[in-house]
Amino acid sequence: LPDRYTWDIGWIVAAADIDVIVAGLEDSERFYEDVAGYRLSDRERDNWTVTIVSTGRGDPWGGGACCTAKTRGDGAETQLFFDVAHPHWRAPYALLSAHGAANTKIVMHEFAHGLQIDHHSTHPDHYRLSNWMREGMAEYFAYRAMIEAGLVDASAVERRLFEACIRTAIMGQSIRDLEDPRGRFWPGDIGFLAITGLVELAPNGADDLLAYVRSLGQGTGRAAAFEASFGLSLEEFYDTFDTWRESARSNHGIEHVWSRYANLQPRIASSIR
């Protein structure tokens, strides 16, 4: 097992599941180093602990999730938790199952949350990142890693997540209403669509996402950090995304995520590379 992590492995955990988690972590490390020059050796926290159990009950902190990332102890450590007997681990997304890569995507999603914690943008009692961005960013980076590895097609990902938003009715909500982690909806799917568009608009693409997280971790407020990182105000982005969301929902078609934006907000659209 890689010694960059502290391993906490329970009883009756299959070797195959451990292998998937190890491979997912290593693929995540390579992806972030290639995309943003981020190496785990540069981390701000003392250690990352990877906990793997096989209980089927999910995380023991009250959420019951298959997998999660959180701070540990006095907050100096990042903990990634995986329950490999949980239904969401045993029967994950069909989109990636055909490629044998669905659980790798789960690992990459939690790794992204680990980076958010690493840069102090999340805290157990206070989320500096809005919930749609926290979950959307984790989905974006996980799926992007899978797309770049050739494990899934980008248009298939966008289509599946768009259709999931239609099914759950979250497409009818402004992402302004999805900032609070205690909300009714899990905003990962619509957050992915919003992050995909934000990356299109950002001067430095995906690099600006991690710059935004770092800025929040340094104590900058959401609105100021957003405008400094992405070159447009948070309110401008909300207006732009909501215009697209309503258009896409009414026409029940995604096309390309930002394909209609040139006619919606000329000042913002002019920054698209």
Image (tube, rainbow, N blue to C red):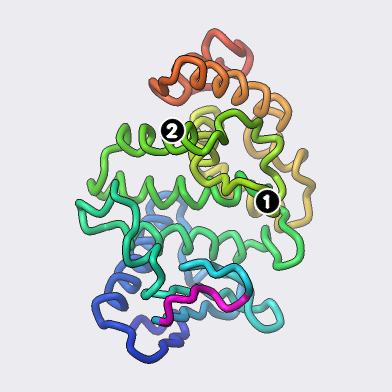
For the point 44% across and 38% down, which residue is it? Answer: 164
| Mark 1: secondary structure | loop
For this orientation, the residue located farthest to the top is: 263
Secondary structure that dominates the magenta span: loop
Dot 2, how many residues are within 10 Å of its Cα: few (below 14), some (14-19), or many (20+)?
Answer: many
Label located before the other in sequence (1 or 2): 1
Q: In which quarter of the image is residue 116?
A: bottom right
Residue 4 % position (x, y): 43, 80
Q: Give the range drawn in magenta.
A: 55-61
- Dot 2: element: helix
For mark 2, what is the residue?
A: 162
Residue 56 or residue 209, whichever sits in front: 56
| Residue in the picture at 43% in, 33% down | 162
Frontmost residue, 104 versus 37: 104
Q: Which residue is drawn at 54% across and 8% down?
A: 263
The residue pinned by badge 1 equals: 129
Left or right placement of residue 72 versus residue 82 in this view: right
Q: Give the CA separation, mark 1 to mark 2.
A: 23 Å
| Numbered disc total | 2
